[in-house]
Amino acid sequence: MIDTHAHIYADQFKDDSKDMLERAREQGIERIYMPNIDHTSIDGMLQLEEDNPGFCFATMGLHPCSVKKDFEKELYIVEEWLGKRKFAAIGEMGTDLYWDKSLIDQQIEAFKIQSEWAKQYMLPIIIHCRESIDMTIDLVEELKTDDLTGVFHCFVGSVAQAERIKALGFHVGLGGVSTFKNGGMDKVIPELDMDYVVLETDSPYLAPVPHRGKRNEPAYVNLVAQRVGDLLQMPIEEVDSITTKNALKLFKAND
């Protein structure tokens, strides 16, 4: 299996990082993609990648919650890194209307700039869209060209929204919310086109049942896979096979 979204460089893992990675390997996790947040997360993320080649993969971008009035400084750092070396994707980027609606114009500008870099470097984008999914789909539809691909991470939307995302050729990332009793995804997942689905944890956040409310980690992606399989009446091995193939295609892992 592949965890397409895990912040395993976070402070929550500082005391047991090696053990956490070993548990992931024991559960059959073959790759972990690490979305960047801002300049403060780069060193830890790149160190994990260096220490775990072929297993941990760094991406580069600016999270919408780190978009402040001086966001151009942060984007300059992102641009500098993109010119230095290869990354698996651009992100985590996007929009967020949950915490602060006052900087949405800056978030949209940062989204457009990073999308252009994605086209330039032929990289997928990892999209965060909390309380802003329709607006963000509109934005991607406006920016869409053949060379813009990516994933709407932590997808908790409707079937209609998933269809719009599929029409763009983008993927949806399913994580711990898929296992929540009142998460609503039990009605949506059976209607999804599995060719556009990837699995994620968003570690250390949104741990799946039965670990809800505790620290999440990549080993738990198998719980998401099991839930998806149960809802689709599909063996977990088939969920693993399909979503792994999708993730490798999304991140152009064989290019």
Image (cartoon, grey):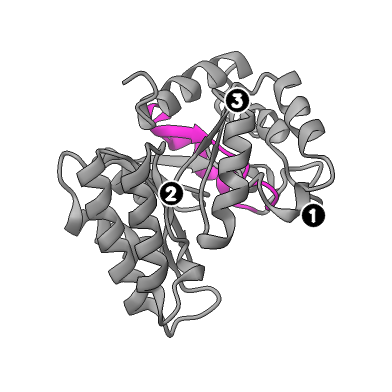
Q: Label 2: which residue?
A: 60
| Number of disc labels | 3
Crowd band around label 3 with a 10 angstrom C-alpha radius: few (<14), some (14–19), many (20+): some
Q: Amino acid at mark 3?
A: Gly
Q: Secondary structure at mark 2?
A: loop
Q: Label 3: which residue?
A: 229
Name the residue nearer the viewer: 163 or 171. 171
Q: Secondary structure at mark 3?
A: helix
In percent of the image, x 15 and y 45: which residue is there?
145
- Residue 213 is marked as 1
Image check: 233 left or right of 58?
right
Which mark is nearer the camera, 1 or 3?
1
In percent of the image, x 58 and y 45: which residue is there?
45
Q: Secondary structure at mark 1?
A: loop
Q: Are marks 1 and 2 in contact (CB under 8 Å)?
A: no
CA–CA distance between discs 1 and 2? Answer: 28 Å
CA–CA distance between discs 2 and 3? Answer: 31 Å
Q: Which residues are magenta?
A: 183-205
Q: Amino acid at mark 1?
A: Gly
Coordinates of residue 228 in the picture (x, y in percent): 59, 31
Name, please, the residue furthest toward the left: 145
Q: Please report whichever mark, 2 or 3, sits nearer to the chain's N-terminal start.
A: 2
Which mark is nearer the camera, 1 or 2?
2
